Image: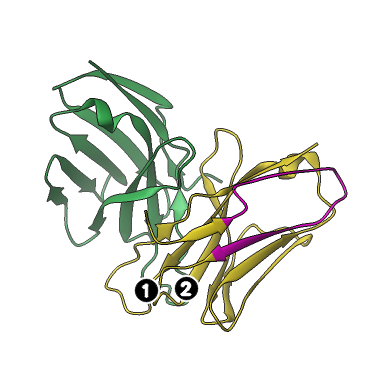
Chain colours: A green, B yellow
Amino acid sequence: DQQVKQNSPSLSVQEGRISILNCDYTNSMFDYFLWYKKYPAEGPTFLISISSIKDKNEDGRFTVFLNKSAKHLSLHIVPSQPGDSAVYFCAASDESNFGNEKLTFGTGTRLTIIP
Amino acid sequence: DSGVTQTPKHLITATGQRVTLRCSPRSGDLSVYWYQQSLDQGLQFLIQYYNGEERAKGNILERFSAQQFPDLHSELNLSSLELGDSALYFCASSPPRRELNEQFFGPGTRLTVL
């Protein structure tokens, strides 16, 4: 049962344009969401997060939007740069489940920025 | 560099063998998590330790076991290896007091079972 889904395995975007990566979840207990970026031969790197009490969080070129009613979140990267080419993972956790802080990951979206 | 180290970087072994993967968390972090990433899959949570004690278990096979030592480094032991165990194994750590669950990942160990 895939509780966190990233339905687009890959995405290509022109440099300078907006990249939008999407993520859906099914578990209504999830209340904290994160995006990780992963380059080949490296571990995932934390990018940005959002708590369920918010619907938007912004950090520089990166903005995450959360729509709780639709159980959907998205990551916007503006403007996209060649260095953004990587695999992006959406992850979720249930922060009320103290003692089990595991992250549930989606399968990732490979973003390619075209120069 | 996340501050989490994992050794070895690569491991090639045969079916039926046993291997040990090692992880050192960031300085000051008490929690260690192990994740498995198979080909084109997301990361699957295996197990979590907190200050030496097992805290949570995920989809970890009985052939796999882990422990966290007094110096907080952790080892993941994989035995009776099968071809399907070939994967990337990541370790992550998080600090003892944190507002929200940000985990910091090591570079991973790539296990190939032939």
In percent of width and height, residue B57 lies at 61, 67
- 2 and 1 marks on the same chain: yes
Question: What secondary structure is found at the residue carrying circle 2?
Answer: strand
Measuring 81% from the left and 36% from the top, which residue is drawn there? B114
Question: What secondary structure is found at the residue carrying circle 1?
Answer: loop
Vertical relation: B108 (above or below) A9: below
**Residue closer to the observer: B112 or A11:** B112
What segment is highlighted magenta in the picture? Answer: B7-23
**Residue closer to the observer: A6 or A115:** A115
- Could you tell whether A11 is left or right of B91 in the image? left
Identify the image quadrant of residue B69. bottom right
* Distance between mark 2 and mark 1 Cα atoms: 7 Å
In percent of width and height, residue A59 lies at 14, 49
CB atoms at circles 2 and 1 under 8 Å apart? Answer: yes
Chain ID for label 2?
Answer: B
- Could you tell whether A94 is left or right of B98 in the image? right
Provide the residue designation for mark 2.
Answer: B31
* Mark found first going from the N terminus, 2 or 1: 2
Residue B51 is labelled as none
**In the image, farthest residue toward the right:** B16
What kind of residue is marked 1?
Answer: Pro
Vertical relation: B84 (above or below) B25: above
In percent of width and height, residue B85 lies at 72, 45
Measuring 81% from the left and 57% from the top, which residue is drawn there? B79
In percent of width and height, residue A115 lies at 22, 15
Provide the residue designation for mark 1.
Answer: B95
Identify the image quadrant of residue B46. bottom right
Badge 2: few (under 14), some or many (20 or more) residues near its Cα, within 10 Å? many
Residue B18 belongs to magenta span: yes
Chain ID for label 1?
Answer: B
Residue A20 belongs to magenta span: no
- Could you tell whether B11 is left or right of B1 in the image? right
